Image (cartoon, helix red, strand yellow):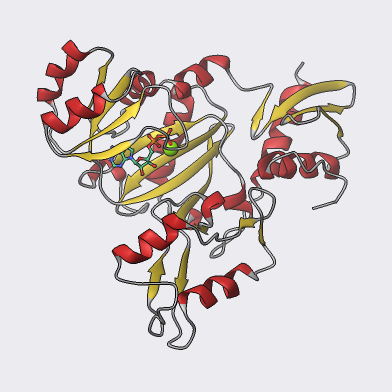
């Protein structure tokens, strides 16, 4: 990426900025924000992360409210976990309609904050609810692997599998050494700056190893995969594998219907299922977890396995077409 791009921009904004400059668009930034003003042939618009001025405000309202998202997912006939919105203790009785174990998550949450997976029974759900103060949704557990789908201009654009930070043994190096070797990859850098983030050795990582009866000085066998964290976020050292070519047309149509119904011309759809080839609607306990109005682009531009997809370029090309209509 050219060095003139301000370093307070996160990876998605930097990718959009670079794609814009490549197309002869003038970019103006606003210190310490993700907002970029783009000007081209007498027209101008803004971007922030992967959002543009052309995104529907209603679509954003839908994505920001997990209970409302459910309504629109049902309208789109998209499979999703059965759920109940609970805003006060009296409504907890509604949980009797659901099959335990359940997930509890804030009605308006992000980045996994306040999400509790696997509440075994009514008592556990009640305690979890009373330990916090926000409206939440409780929902049944989906099963499988979590995939991220992106649609741009209501067309399926890419699919990726996010993997938690991990190392593969060679029978010689210790886990600490394997982490150090992995961190030497030129893509790995601090925070959101690089194409991938560095794997940090901290308490959480050490605890995760302990749960697997491992320590930093253990020497995993050849080809033994050691998962270092529970979360698959790229910012915690995770990595992405591109699976775009595995998504069958029937699943692509489903994702496009979700994008249209939720009125988001750039959308990230999180889905939990066995695979992306068989119709998701026919897979047991599979469904849409949530939708995102500003999906991160790093995982599609820099997958460690599979093909690269220039989503930033596609978003800018779409924005140019919309701007010309103004
Ligand atoms: N119904 C569910 N079944 C299984 N896991 C879930 C379910 N809902 C959420 N999760 C897990 O919790 C994580 C965070 O939930 P999500 O709805 O994506 O909230 P956030 O907006 O905070 O990211 C998901 O990435 C997934 O791992
Ligand atoms: Mg999420």
Look at the image and tell me in which quarter the C terminus lies. Answer: top right
Q: Nearer the viewer, residue 225 or 288?
A: 225
Q: Of all residues shown, which one is farthest toward the front?
A: 203
Image region (quadrant) for ligand 1: top left
Q: Depth check: 87 or 287 in front?
A: 87
Q: Residue at x 20, y 46 (%)?
A: 284
Image spot of residue 218 (x, y percent):
40, 79
User: Splitting the image into 4 quarters, where does residue 33 fall?
Assistant: top right
Q: Is residue 29 left or right of residue 103?
A: right
Count up the numbered dots: 0
Task: Say if 38 sits above or below 238 in the image.
Answer: above
The reply, left or right, for residue 279 in relation to residue 92 is: right
Is 175 above or below relative to 105? below
**Residue at (52% x, 41% y) in the render:** 150
Q: Residue at x 70, y 67 (%)?
A: 186
Q: What x and y, as percent, mark residue 73?
A: 35, 26
Q: Position of residue 188 (x, y in %)?
A: 65, 61
């Amino acid at each position: 990426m050219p060095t003139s791009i301000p370093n307070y921009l996160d990876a998605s904004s930097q990718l959009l900025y670079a794609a814009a400059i490549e197309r002869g668009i003038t970019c103006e930034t606003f210190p310490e924000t993700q907002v970029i003003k783009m000007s081209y042939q007498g027209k101008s618009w803004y971007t922030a992360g992967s959002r543009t001025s052309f995104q529907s405000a209603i679509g954003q309202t839908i994505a920001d409210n997990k209970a409302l998202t459910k309504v629109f997912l049902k309208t789109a006939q998209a499979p999703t976990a059965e759920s109940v919105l609970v805003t006060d203790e009296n409504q907890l009785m509604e949980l009797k309609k659901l099959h335990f174990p359940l997930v509890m998550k804030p009605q308006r949450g992000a980045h996994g904050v306040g999400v509790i997976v696997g509440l075994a029974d009514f008592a556990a759900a009640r305690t979890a609810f009373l330990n916090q103060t926000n409206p939440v949704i409780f929902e049944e557990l989906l099963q499988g692997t979590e995939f991220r789908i992106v649609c741009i201009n209501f067309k399926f654009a890419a699919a990726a599998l996010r993997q938690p930070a991990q190392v593969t043994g060679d029978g010689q190096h210790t886990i600490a050494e394997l982490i150090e070797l992995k961190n030497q990859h030129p893509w790995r850098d601090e925070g959101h700056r690089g194409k991938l983030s560095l794997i940090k050795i901290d308490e959480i990582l050490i605890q995760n190893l302990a749960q697997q009866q491992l320590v930093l000085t253990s020497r995993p066998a050849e080809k033994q995969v050691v998962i270092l964290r529970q979360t698959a976020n790229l910012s915690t050292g995770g990595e992405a594998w591109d699976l775009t070519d595995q998504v069958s047309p029937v699943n692509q149509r489903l994702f496009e219907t979700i994008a249209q119904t939720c009125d988001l011309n750039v959308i990230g759809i999180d889905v939990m299922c066995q695979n992306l080839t068989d119709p998701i609607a026919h897979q047991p306990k599979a469904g849409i977890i949530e939708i995102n109005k500003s999906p991160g682009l790093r995982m599609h531009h820099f997958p460690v396995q599979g093909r690269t997809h220039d989503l930033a370029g596609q978003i800018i090309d779409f924005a140019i077409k919309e701007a010309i209509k103004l």
